[in-house]
Amino acid sequence: FLRRHADLSPDGLGAIYEIDVNTKTPTLWMNLNSKTHLGSSATLFPHETAANRGLSSPFAPSHDVWAYSRVAKEGLGGLDISDDYKTIYAMDLSNRQLLVIDTASKTVSNRYPITNPGCDGGAGDVRPFAVDYIKGEVYVGVSCSGETRQKDSDVNAHVMKLTGSSFTSVVSTATGFKWESYWTDEVYAYGSSCNNLSYSLRNAYIPLITNIELDNNNNMVIGVTSRNGFRFGEGNYAADESCNKLIKGHESRGFVLNATPSGSQWNLSSNELWNTDNGDEKHHYKDGIYAHWGSGTSQTYIGGMAKTDCSGEEVILTNLMDPLAHETSGTRYMRTSDAQQEAAQSIGDTTIATSTASTRELTRGVGNSWEKSA
């Protein structure tokens, strides 16, 4: 998956790796970037060197113009494997199709184009990402980008289910936030400029479903983050090589949503609610105290989710910006019964100075504390 300001692996955007759990060494398992795998009429995934993208040492700022328009549009998105380990499902973002891979032969056995879930802007707005194999079924997350007509009102997010050779929408309006913004690749959109890289651009919430799970009661848990979280970085430049003003105070939102089964579909458990404490609109999860919060900081899901009940309590593991304390980054174990924290662990940096430059979740000052949003 392509992220701005981060180099690609030597094998590029089509690479799938396997890791030996003993040696922790990754080796190339398969490279999907060929017309044999993607299809004879498919567009191959792009590639560019770190040097040509202006990427050097880890903390050196970059413009990375090349990646700006390609994030969440090119290469591979979600990846999952069937329960019998015989099939891998990979989302091809460039050609908007789901690839079905036979693990024994390492060949693509099927390709399923992602159908329009109801995007008002038409097929050009269909932007898939998530893919999850759950209880013998395949689910995908699809955003309606609003990019065709450049309208916020065209933005939406859906979960779709593979039925036969086509997809049907089973959850709609899975955005988690009222003020979603349309996808745009303009460097200075929404009235911004080099000297005013405005909040409305760098912090625009652009919904991207990254993960889907079903709990033991068949409730659907949906992880939604923002495309812009992968396109901007604290201490870097705008995607304009003539602008050398460092970006400060970037953040973008992320949510964990819950939907309850209703026939062949799922309904979100609650609508966005106005919270008078801080003036933001947020989505409750099972009436819990904002399950997507970290340590008092809101809207913090950054992508990556799994379900387990190995501890005797069914929990959803979610990557959050502040699972324990500000500027930590890590994973929270949330009970599916009430969305409250069962446990948490930090895997990130412990100081503001270091984490500002080294983590995706980026920081901004809030009074005497710090807020770090996904």
Image (cartoon, grey):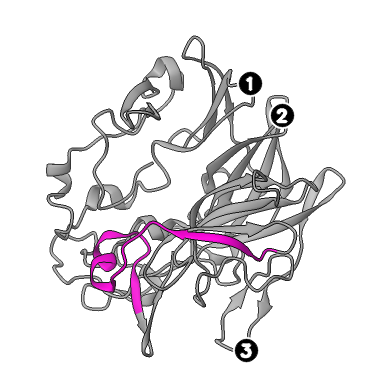
Picture coordinates of residue 110, whole percent (x, y): 57, 19
| Residue pointed to by mark 2 | 136
Q: In front of the other: label 2 or label 1?
A: 1
Secondary structure of the residue carrying numbered label 3: loop
Q: Nearer the viewer, residue 162 or 365?
A: 365
**How far is the residue under mark 1 from the one under mark 3?**
48 Å
Residue type beneath disc 3: Thr
Secondary structure of the residue carrying numbered label 1: loop
Q: Nearer the viewer, residue 1 or 219?
A: 219
**How far is the residue under mark 2 from the one under mark 1?**
10 Å
Q: Which residues are magenta?
A: 339-364
Picture coordinates of residue 239, whole percent (x, y): 24, 59
- In the picture provided, is 235 more to the left or to the right than 139? left
Residue type beneath disc 1: Asp
Q: Residue furthest front?
A: 311
| Residue pointed to by mark 3 | 276
Q: Is residue 237 above or below residue 171?
A: below
**How far is the residue under mark 3 from the one under mark 2?**
43 Å
Looking at the image, can residue 120 be seen?
no
